[in-house]
Image (cartoon, grey):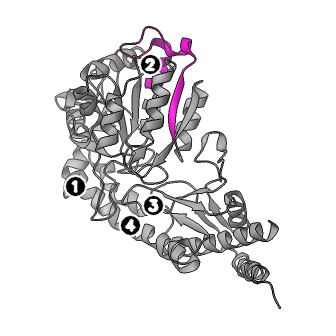
Amino acid sequence: MTNPSQDALAQAQAAYAELKARGLKLNLQRGQPADADFDLSNPMLSALGEGDTHFDGIDLRNYPGGIGGLPSARALFGHYLDLKPENVLVWNNSSLELQGLVLGFALLHGVRGSETGWVHQKPKMIVTVPGYDRHFLLLQTMGFELLTVDMQDDGPDVDAVEKLAASDPSVKGILFVPTYSNPGGETVSEEKARRLAGLKAAAPDFTIFADDAYRAHHLFEERDTPVNFVTLCRDAGHPDRAFVFASTSKITFAGAGLGFVGSSEDNIKWLGKYLNAQSIGPNKVEQARHVKFLQSYEGGLEGLMRDHAALIAPKFQAVYDALSAELGEGGGGYATWRTPRGGYFISLDTVDPVADRVVQLADEAGISLTPAGATYPGGKDPHNANIRLAPTRPPLAEVEVAMRGVATCIKLAAEEYRAGR
C-alpha cells in the first residue's frame, strides 16, 4: 500500500523533471513595461521639431523656466493628482529620486514644522509589508530605522500606525504605495486615509509619503478609487502632512519619463528652495514633449492608460488562470494569491514556508522570479511565504508558460516540505 504523501511527492518530482527538460529562459522578476507598451509612446520621440524652441512662452534651450517645472506640465500632472498646478512640482525622470531628495532635505533641515533636521533625532519610518524593496533600500541607505505594519485589504494597518506614531516622536512618517500597492495591489480606503491624515502623532512633523506610482493603472472595468492625501490632510488641520509622488515611468518610457510630487503650496515652495540650491531647473525639453504628446494622444492620458490596460490585463488574467488550472481553484491548499484591479504586480503566498525553495526551483528550471523575501526589509520574510509576480514584461504566451511552471515548483516545494515534517 502506497503512502499518499509519497505519491504526491513523486508526482511533483516527475512534473518538475519535465519542466526542467524544456530548457526555458523566462523572466518575471521586475515590473518593467513590455516593448508593446513602450511602442504606444514612440510618437513622443518626434513630438518636438527643430522649430519647437519655446513652450509656455519659455525658451526650452535656456536656463530660465522655474524650479517647479513648465506651467503646462504642472497643470497636466496636477489634474492627474487632482490638485491645482501650484500644488505640484514636476522634476526629471524618477519619482524615487524625488522621494530621496525630499527625505534628504528632511534629514538635513527637517520639514515645515520641524525644530531641527531629522538626522539629529535617530529617525524611524513606518513601511508596509509586503512592500516595495526600493523603499526599504532607500530608507535604510539614508539611515532610517524601519518599522513595519501589515498592508491589509483596505490599506495599512492604521491601528498599528496610530500606536507607533503616538508613542515615539522619532517616528517621522510612513512611506507606502496607496493605490494598487506593490506587490499586493491593495488600495487605501477613504476611511483609513482620513485616519492617517488626522492621526495624533508624538512628532509634530509626522509626514505621509505616498508613492502613488499606479494611481491611473487600472486594468479592468471595475476599478479602485485613489484618495487625495493632500486635500484630506488639509481638511484634517495638517496641511503640510502629505507628499504624494508619481511619475510617467509606467505611462510613457520607464527610463525617460517625468517624476512629480504634489503637496501643499508651502511644501512645494519649501522643496523648490532646496532644489534651487543644487539645480537651475528640470529638463524642460522632456516636459514639453510629454505635455505635447499626452495632450495629442486620443483620449489623452486616460486614453493611453486604457491602451496599456488592453495589453497588460490579459497577462494578469493568464496568471490567475494558470495558477487555478495547475493548483486548483483557490490554490488547492498550496498557495493563495491576490487578484488586484490594477497596478503592476501580483502577490502570491505559499501555504507552507517554502517561498525561497519555490524561487530556487523556478530559477533552476529557467524561470527567474523576484527573490523570496524581497517584499520585506532586509530581504527577510518572517513567514517565508510571499513571492512577488511581475507579468508585465514578457509576451502573453511566455507568461502562461512561466506561471504553469511556477505552479509546478510550488507543488514540489510544498510536497518536499510536508514529506520532511
Which secondary structure lies at badge 3? Answer: loop
Dividing the image into 4 quarters, which one contains the N terminus? bottom right
Between disc 2 and disc 4, the foreground one is: 2
Marks 1 and 2 sit apart, C-alpha to C-alpha, by 47 Å
Which residue, given by chain and number where applicable, does mark 3 sit on?
Answer: 34
**Mark 4 and 1 residues: CB-CB less than 8 Å, in contact?**
no
Residue at image x 21%, y 26%? 86
Q: Earlier in the sequence, mark 4 or mark 3?
A: 3
Q: How many marks?
A: 4
Marks 4 and 1 sit apart, C-alpha to C-alpha, by 21 Å
Which residue, given by chain and number where applicable, does mark 2 sit on?
Answer: 202
**Mark 2 and 3 residues: CB-CB less than 8 Å, in contact?**
no
Work out whether residue 156 can be spotted. yes
Q: Which percent across, then down, holds residue 10?
A: 78, 81
Marks 4 and 3 sit apart, C-alpha to C-alpha, by 13 Å
Which secondary structure lies at badge 4? Answer: helix
Q: Amino acid at mark 4?
A: Ala
Residue 297 badge: 1
Magenta part of the chain: 100-128
In the figure, is residue 249 to the left or right of 397? Answer: left
Q: Residues within 10 Å of mark 3 (few under 14, many from 20)?
A: some
| Residue 158 inside the magenta-drawn segment | no
